[in-house]
Amino acid sequence: MEYLIGIQGPDFVLVAADNVAASSIIQMKHDYDKMFKLSEKILLLCVGEAGDTVQFAEYIQKNVQLYKMRNGYELSPAAAANFTRKNLADYLRSRTPYHVNLLLAGYDDTDGPGLYYMDYLSSLAKAPFAAHGYGAYLTLSILDRYYRPDLSRDEAVDLLKKCGEELNKRFILNLPSFTVRLIDKEGIHDLEKLTLGTK
Amino acid sequence: MEHGVCICVCISTSCHTCKSYKSARTQKQMRKSSSIRPLQTRPVSLTLKIVPFRLAHGTTTLGFIFQGGVIAAADTRASAGGLVACPAVHKITPIHSHLVVTSSGSGADCMLWERILIREIRLYQLRHGHRLSIRATAKLLSSMLHPFKGTEMCVALTLCGWDNGPKLIYVCSDGARLQGDVFSVGSGSPYAYGVLDRELRWSLSKGEAISLAREAVFRATHRDAYSGNNVDLFHITAQGWSQRKREDLKEEYYRDKEKKGKKKNDKLK
């Protein structure tokens, strides 16, 4: 039902998430933000079971902030991704596992941009592009076809638009708008919301 | 997992709150393994098995924000399977002078959690000297409900109130916590959304907003078997909440029929 997508460029990461908060067959909210800002240059996109998403994402968010307060510098995206994965793995075989699918996107001043794909079984993979949700079945092949490691920002946004149009055309659920953000060495930038009209 | 559309009697399975907020999930696991099971009489509606999606409990409640504050409305029927257990229930409960909560789900669970919320908010006010904000109230409630996630407890509350502006927050025992401008909860909610989404605007006057809320609940109770009887309406502003006299939807039905009859006659002329 929910959709997340991330595309890594040579010096940026572009991420987008749909804006629907649903309860059974009803859209409760049309403007829900599924991205959580972990630090100045790291975003966590989180979808999954109703309460688990916010609980887990906020837990990670606060712990990343705590690290900064204790140590004086921020966790790198790779470290944050591994920390998140460890927590997910620890809870997986407990009595209260978190059923959440995540994308972690960040920019490291030394290593550059990074996009990390995590699923509810706490697998972690660094990938040039990734997507979560039923929409991923429709859009991963588009990403495979048109992705190049040296995409410019505009080209990446166009690729994102292509994915959105495909969802609009073939996905049975209505996902009218997507929040889009870009992370680069300057930090996190809000881009224009991607809204798709009727087919 | 499907729940009966019910206001079922609170059986021992959900009375953990008296003891502590220890994870009810662990207790459930322990109980499952023991050979002695407590007597469970959870009414199951036959219609639940035919419907392709999970029904959300016999109620229509709604809340929305407009220029004149917040309106909260709910029907008053408590159903237990196919029986109308009580035709005159209060589904909207004031928490403090500027906050009311509409309840949906299991009646016993909602009553309990409303009382707990009133207690916690009052304690906070006494300890800290100021009232907790509504967003914080919602977060507190959500944290208190979290240990019971995965158990059969079912509460879906809408906090409607005023603190530095109108606020409307939906909190559910699944863990969802959403702030928005319009929410409708319960088995009659799709019907209510149908009416609300057409006519809701920020610029409604107080009278228009109240009649819109009444109409939305009326249309929902007309179609939904598990909602009905009367409608309760609350209006919350910066000055606090005020309650309208409870209205019988039967009267609304006859008024509506008359209006349609008049329209038909006008057309024929």
Image: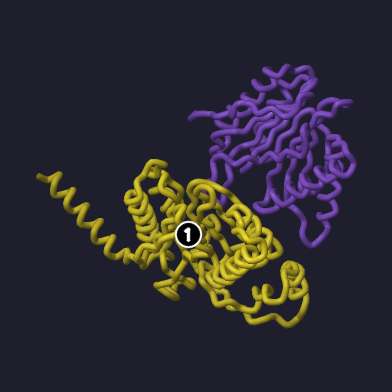
Chain colours: A purple, B yellow
Is residue A159 depicted above or below B182 in this figure?
above
The answer to whether residue A94 is left or right of residue B14 is right
Residue B126: x %, y % from top left: 63, 66
- Residue A156 rendering spot, x and y as whole percentages: 69, 21
Looking at the picture, how far across and down is residue A53, in whole percent? 70, 49
State which chain disc 1 sits on. Answer: B
Q: Is residue B43 above or below residue B226?
A: below
Q: Quarter-wise, where is residue A127 in the image?
A: top right
Residue in the image at 67% along x and 51% along y: A49
From this viewpoint, which residue is outermost toward the left? Answer: B269
Q: Quick one: A162 or B106, which is closer to the camera?
A: B106
Considering only vertical position in the picture, is B249 above or below A47?
A: below
Asked if residue B74 can be seen in this view, the reply is yes
Amino acid bearing label 1? Ser
Residue drawn 80% across the image and 43% down it: A65
B49 or A106: nearer the eye?
A106
Q: Looking at the rendering, which quadrant does residue B245 occupy?
A: bottom left
Task: Say whether residue B225 is visible.
Answer: no
Identify which residue is drawn at 63% across, 61% down.
B129
Quarter that holds the N terminus of chain A: top right
Which residue is drawn at the image coordinates 68% and 30% (left, top)? A181
